Amino acid sequence: MFSSRPAVHPVEAPPLTDAAENHPLRLRMKDVQGMPGTSGGLALRLVQFSFALSALCVMVTTNDYTSVTAFCYLVAAVSLQSLWSLSLAFVDAYALLVMRCLRNRPITFFFTLGDGIMSTLTFAGACSSAGITVLIGNDLGLCSENHCTSFETATAMAFLSWFAISISFMLNFWLLAAR
Amino acid sequence: MFSSRPAVHPVEAPPLTDAAENHPLRLRMKDVQGMPGTSGGLALRLVQFSFALSALCVMVTTNDYTSVTAFCYLVAAVSLQSLWSLSLAFVDAYALLVMRCLRNRPITFFFTLGDGIMSTLTFAGACSSAGITVLIGNDLGLCSENHCTSFETATAMAFLSWFAISISFMLNFWLLAAR
């Protein structure tokens, strides 16, 4: 009966190795650039901010954007997104400076929710502006009376900003689900 | 030396229990309605299809939608989405009938990618149409000469269809990441 006791050691050892092997994703996730608290994440936030700010500046310089609701909405959306991206750029920079990890669940959930809302708002603004710009330029042919180039540039910048924030959203959502 | 042989059994047993405990999410995921191969998933696909088809029918019944590029784009986007949703509704119905699981990684990746592309296209179409509808109705006040009610209804249906497909996308993406 008691002769089998030494075999207790291998019983305790395997689960540790097994647990490490069961989570290759969790170990790999820490290396993915673009997630909160990485230099890639900070770069992504700065790209989002700069494109959103460019869209805002280009749209505001046309003095007649207020006559179209969709352009006003785009200005509001990219203003909000530039504020959001700048705030998170500061958070990322702080996390990098103090070597702090931003990977706990409530923070990731907050970032995912914010990125999701912001990307939806910016994409909606960019699409509605694109619709109006195509209507003015192609369908009605009124580019001589309107600032078509500015509208197109602002729309393109908003699309680029949306693309950058949707990468952040995907990475955060993946991080949230993979935990 | 050979007296410890019977202890081989407990060595093999614990990792199995441990592996099951390490994946509480994977076990829970199977119960979430709305994922591929569930009755909730089938219902979601049918909701997407019906809203997309409604948007298509309402927009096509206005004879002047072809004069605006954004409305033509909306028609193309909801046509594609209704085809996609109907196809996946058939796949879900088949999976439910033969009690087959649709949870392997390539299938989930394909569904996530398709849902992501379709939801982006439909949302872009809905937003650009909303921009034009608000321009015609509010900014220019030309509703007496245009089918404003039809445009608004088609846009609303496209938004509802987008909302339903984005739920599918989120669930599939979560399933893909949680594996």
Image (spheres, coloured by chain):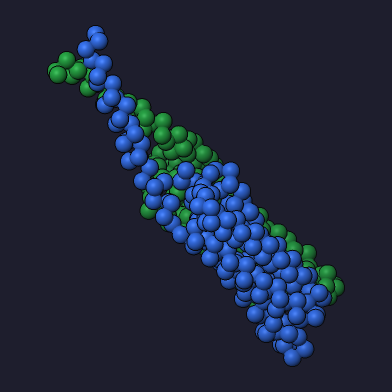
Chain colours: A green, B blue
Q: x%, y% of residue B155? A: 65, 75
Q: Is residue A65 above or below residue A15?
A: below
Looking at this view, is A32 or A86 the one in front?
A: A32
Residue at horizontal 23%, vertical 15%? Answer: B4
Q: x%, y% of residue A145? A: 82, 75
Looking at this view, is A99 or B97 the one in front?
A: B97
Q: x%, y% of residue B96? A: 52, 56
Q: x%, y% of residue A65? A: 69, 74
Looking at this view, is B117 or A150 the one in front?
A: B117
Viewed as shown, does residue A125 lie left or right of A90?
right
Q: Is residue A2 above or below residue B38?
A: above
Residue at horizontal 80%, vertical 81%? Answer: B63
Looking at this view, is B39 or B97 the one in front?
A: B97
Q: Quadrant of residue A1?
A: top left
Q: Quadrant of residue A138?
A: bottom right
One can see residue A153 in this view: yes
Residue at horizontal 45%, vertical 41%? Answer: A96
Q: Is residue A18 above or below residue A96?
A: above
- Give the quarter of the figure containing the N terminus of chain B: top left
Viewed as shown, does residue A69 lie left or right of A9?
right
- Residue sitting at the far front: B98
- Residue sitting at the far top: B1
